[in-house]
Amino acid sequence: MRVLGIDPGIERVGWGITVSHGNDATYINCGCIKTSKKLSHYERLTLVADKLKQVIIREKPDKASVEKLFFSTNKKTALTVAEARGVILYTIHKEGLPIEEFTPLEVKMAITGNGKADKKQVAWMVKNILKIKEDITQDDALDALALSLMIRS
């Protein structure tokens, strides 16, 4: 099963593609959809939707895994990311993909066995699980790959 993992955001949306084979998974591709602060909020949301649709068409996933939001102390940022997440969920659904959602705690527990693991621990485990040799420096893309590992065939 080909899985698209998505780490929602407005400035950067991380995405990652893996193929699961039972308990094993293979790394396929990952990246970030980036938007400029120079664009209006509506233009940024539209860009996220358009670029995500391009990723879905190009990568042909069977299912998507999207991070659930946790409440943040910065309400303005939380609302902006929530709006982006809504656009992301709509785009994925409109493209006909089943969606599963996971909290950051669930992902950290599944990937590292520790719900309080930091980003470095999660990234290290993702790279080891997927046997990634190349240097992936985008945290959002690595988080998306972790989310893609949450769904197994």
Image (spheres, grey):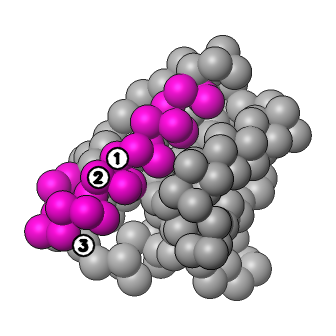
The amino acid beneath tag 2 is Leu
User: Mark 3 belongs to which amino acid?
Assistant: Ala
Q: Residue at x 69, y 51 (%)?
A: 47
Residue 7 falls inside the magenta stretch? no
As helix, strand or loop, the secondary structure at mark 3 comes to loop
> Which quadrant does the N terminus fall into?
top right
Q: Could you say where residue 49 lies in the image, as x and y percent from the top left? A: 65, 41
Which of the two residues, 39 or 47, is positioned nearer the viewer here? 39
Which residue sits furthest left? 73
For the residue pair 70 and 87, the one nearer the viewer reads as 87
Residue placed at 62% from the left, 75% from the top?
38
Sequence-wise, the earlier of marks 3 and 1 is 1
- The crowd level at tag 2 (other Cα within 10 Å; few <14, some 14-19, many 20+) is few
Is residue 37 in sight in this rendering? yes
Residues tagged 2 and 1 counted as in contact (Cβ below 8 A): yes
Residue indicated by mark 1: 82
Q: Confirm whether the magenta stretch covers residue 87.
A: yes
Judging by the rendered image, the residue that carries numbered circle 3 is: 117
Cα gap from disc 3 to disc 1, whole angstroms: 24 Å
Q: Give the residue drawn at x 42%, y 28%.
A: 100
Where is 72 relative to 81, above or below? below
The span picked out in magenta is 70-92
| Rendering coords of residue 35 (x, y %) | 64, 66
Is residue 149 in view from this perspective?
Answer: no
Which residue is most to the front?
Answer: 40
Return the mark for residue 34. none
Left or right: where does residue 131 sit relative to residue 51? left
Q: Amino acid at mark 1?
A: Ala
Depth check, mark 3 against mark 1: the one in front is 1
User: Which residue is drawn at the image coordinates 36% and 77% (left, top)?
Assistant: 119
Q: Which mark is residue 79?
A: 2
Query: What main secondary structure does the magenta stretch of the protein show?
Result: helix
